[in-house]
Amino acid sequence: MSAGIRVASLDDIREGEGIAIDKSVTGTADNIALLRDDGGSVWALDDTCTHEEASLAEGWVEGGLVECPLHASKFCLKNGEVQGLPATRNTCPHRVEVRDGEVYLFPNEAP
Amino acid sequence: MTGGVIVVGGGIAGVSTAAALRSGGFDGDLTLIDAGELPYDRPPLSKEFLSGAKEIKDIALQPEGWYDDQSVRLVSRTTVTALRPGDGAVELSDGTFVRADRVVLATGGRAVRPPIPGCGNSRVHVLRTAEDADRLRAALVPGATVLVVGAGLIGAEVASTARTLGCEVTLADPVCPPLFQVFGEDVAAWLHGVHAEHGIKTVHSGVDSLDEQDADVVVLGVGMVPETTLAEAAELETDRGIIVDHGQVTSNPAVLAVGDPARLRHATRTGHWEAAQHDGQRAAATILGNPAPAATAPWFWTHRHALHVEVVGDLGAATTTVVRGSLGEPPFAAFGLHGGRVVGAVAVNDPTAVRAARRMIDRAIAADPARLADPATDLRRLLRGEGTPP
């Protein structure tokens, strides 16, 4: 198991918001959205909505879900499951750890 | 144990009904009857599907395998010719009958063709179905002259798409500015002005005859009539729509109606995508005997000239309006307030403003206009009651 990639400080991500980590850093096919829910936990999903070209990192994070900024499809923060049309496909979750205020990402590892 | 359900019509309202029934635990027979091949999403018909950027398979409402996965019997290329609520059945265009305890009418609507001279001419188009869009796309060749009648949401989107396809576009509407009721006067005027910046000729006029128009292509975007034929033949109560109660039940308790044709007696239909989805979820809750999902402020989006425009709530109910950012310099938003509370908002390329406004409306949260107007105010934090100045 890898040690993870340090991609951000926890303070970089406000509660209820997200930031996108570029795929050149993560080595994944898509950028990865780091999303901080209203309870303070950080989750990671593929950044591009599965419906159209939109960044989930710019979405609204609330109640365990992120809402796409374009057409409001919602995805579960924990497992990437789509919760409502117009998107029909799940997005991919990635494992995240927060240690000493730093956010470590484990691309393509299940959370 | 509930008996079977038939959903008539595979638009967003019908498919949402079926999906909400299954996710709510409905385990009876579920049949979805649709005139097309595979139910598809309609918003792209005036945008990416019309431009050719997306094909029909790209705009499916659900993947093909979903119907089997969810045990939804999809009856394609079939219409319902009659409801037989007394017999607990519907009659199909192939002459067969399907039995069910409940029928949900998700029959959508038809594009209005006003009775003006030349309306039946082959160069006159409407846009409601994928077939309409295919036919229109074939006519929108570079250099074609296109007259779009009606600068509402569909007219504006078609004009914008036609322009990207290289057509010479004229957009005519007698209202000035078009859509002022939904966007508010100032934002509506600015949005309408954007057409001219993209080389579209806007004409402040209605069109009385299509005979004298020399355009290669005419597109009518002048509204929708709810499809109530089946309901009327079955003697359900109709009045500019199929009359339903708050649980989507019609005057016959075995029949429900959702989406464009359904209308609450004392309300106007909102007619948008999400409203149709919510109708389906309410109908499913009624059938399952579950509480109705919480109501939320109406919301829709539209897309023109690469601008993403969203509206939530009712700007017409506002007594004051505050602009966040600069009107005409996206991203910006306008919030409509009444009695110290947000009642509506419109945003151009600013989705966060509309998501915050929606929550302020739904939760009846008082909002300080000066802070709403300041682009430096974090709307998420404002909503949570954080960062309020002393």
Image (cartoon, rainbow, N blue to C red):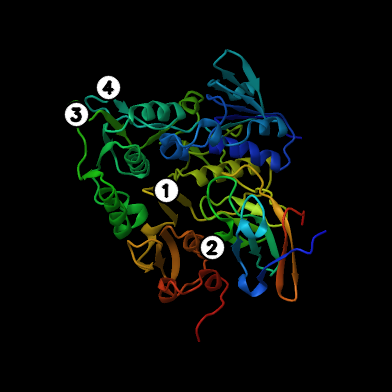
Q: Are marks 3 and 2 on the same chain?
A: yes
Between label 4 and label 3, give the one nearer the viewer: 3
> Nearest the camera: B138 or B223?
B138
* Res B24 → quadrant: top right
Q: Of the residues under marks 3 and 1, which one precedes in the sequence?
A: 3
Q: Is residue B328 above or below residue B126?
A: below
Reading the image, the residue beneath label 1 is B302
Q: Of the residues under marks 3 and 2, which one precedes in the sequence?
A: 3
Name which residue type carries label 1. Thr
Which chain's residue wears label 2?
B
Quadrant the N terminus of chain B occupies? top right
In three-dimensional space, the C-alpha distance between marks 4 and 3, rounded to whole angstroms, equals 12 Å
Mark number, residue B359 = 2
Mark number, residue B121 = 4
Q: Residue furthest right?
A: A1
Reading the image, the residue beneath label 3 is B214
Mark 3, secondary structure of its residue: loop
Q: Position of residue B184 (x, y in %)?
A: 33, 58
Name which residue type carries label 3. Asp
Mark 2, secondary structure of its residue: helix
* Res B254 → quadrant: top right
In three-dimensional space, the C-alpha distance between marks 3 and 1, rounded to whole angstroms, equals 29 Å
In three-dimensional space, the C-alpha distance between marks 3 and 2, rounded to whole angstroms, equals 49 Å
Q: Residue at x 40, y 63 (%)?
A: B333
Between label 3 and label 2, give the one nearer the viewer: 3
In three-dimensional space, the C-alpha distance between marks 2 and 4, rounded to whole angstroms, equals 47 Å
